[in-house]
Image (spheres, rainbow, N blue to C red):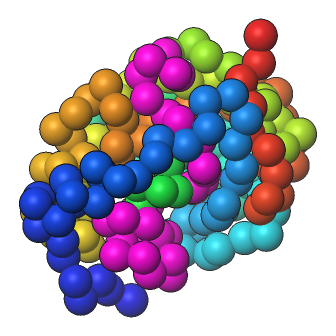
Amino acid sequence: MTNALHLTMEQLDAGLSVLPKGPRHRGTVEMIVRRPETGERQVLEQADLVVGGGLVGDNYLTRENPKAPDGKAHPEAQLNLMNSRTIDLIAAGDRRLWQLAGDQFFVDFDLSLENAPPGTRWGIGEAVIEVSHKPHNGCNKFSERFGIDAARWVNVAKHERRRGINAMVVRAGVVRRGDAIEKLG
């Protein structure tokens, strides 16, 4: 599945001007995606999160990381979350294309730096996750799937975190589509 329509920066900016950020304290898990192998996606109704391993069955731990000296997964990138309103804009309203972004969770929640600084903990379903310091940026794969303008656009306003966030599991649990995601403490 590929995206035949790549929006321009102007189209994305116009869409953003009418796009609310999402709830600041309590939102909703809109989609869960497992990546069992590179390039494969499984949309799930529920997922198990484990401390140190992220989403069970995802390739987070087994995928090579050429940027790490030891080639292993970055401990602060167990999970990737993206705002569902933002991906819906980028995917031109085609929900089937969300999974191509490569994130495991698409949430209706304000992921901005102001609302979710590193160290912020959230309850998500039965689990607890913590926002990491590692930035989540648009990469070559994102550019191939959604266009160069979309990749640039998500990286322009770092404080808005249009591309989303990285997080770590700090308490294991089950997360279901439709579950709440909420700030703790």
In this view of the protein, which residue sits in the foreground, 76 or 19? 19
Give the image location of residue 43, x and y in percent: 65, 74
Question: 18 above or below 34?
Answer: above
Quadrant in the picture for the N terminus: bottom left
**Residue under the point 73% across and 35% down:** 26
Give the image location of residue 180, x and y in percent: 79, 44
In this view of the protein, which residue sits in the foreground, 170 or 131? 131
Q: Is residue 83 magenta?
A: no
Whether residue 77 appears in this view of the structure is no
Magenta stretch, residue numbers = 88-117
Question: 58 above or below 156?
Answer: below
Quadrant in the picture for the C terminus: top right
Compared across the picture, whether 129 is left or right of 153 comes to right
In this view of the protein, which residue sits in the foreground, 132 or 69? 132
Compared across the picture, whether 161 is left or right of 25 comes to left
Compared across the picture, whether 44 is left or right of 171 comes to left
Question: 152 above or below 43?
Answer: above
**Residue under the point 18% across and 76% down:** 6
**Residue under the point 60% across and 50% down:** 107
Please tell me how many numbered marks the rendered image carries: 0
Question: 37 above or below 55?
Answer: below
Q: Is residue 101 magenta?
A: yes
Give the image location of residue 112, x and y in percent: 43, 29
Whether residue 42 appears in this view of the structure is yes
Write down the quadrant of residue 106 in the picture: bottom right
Write down the quadrant of residue 27 in the picture: top right
- Of all residues, the one furthest to the front in this rendering is 18
Give the image location of residue 110, x and y in percent: 53, 36
Write down the quadrant of residue 123 in the picture: top right
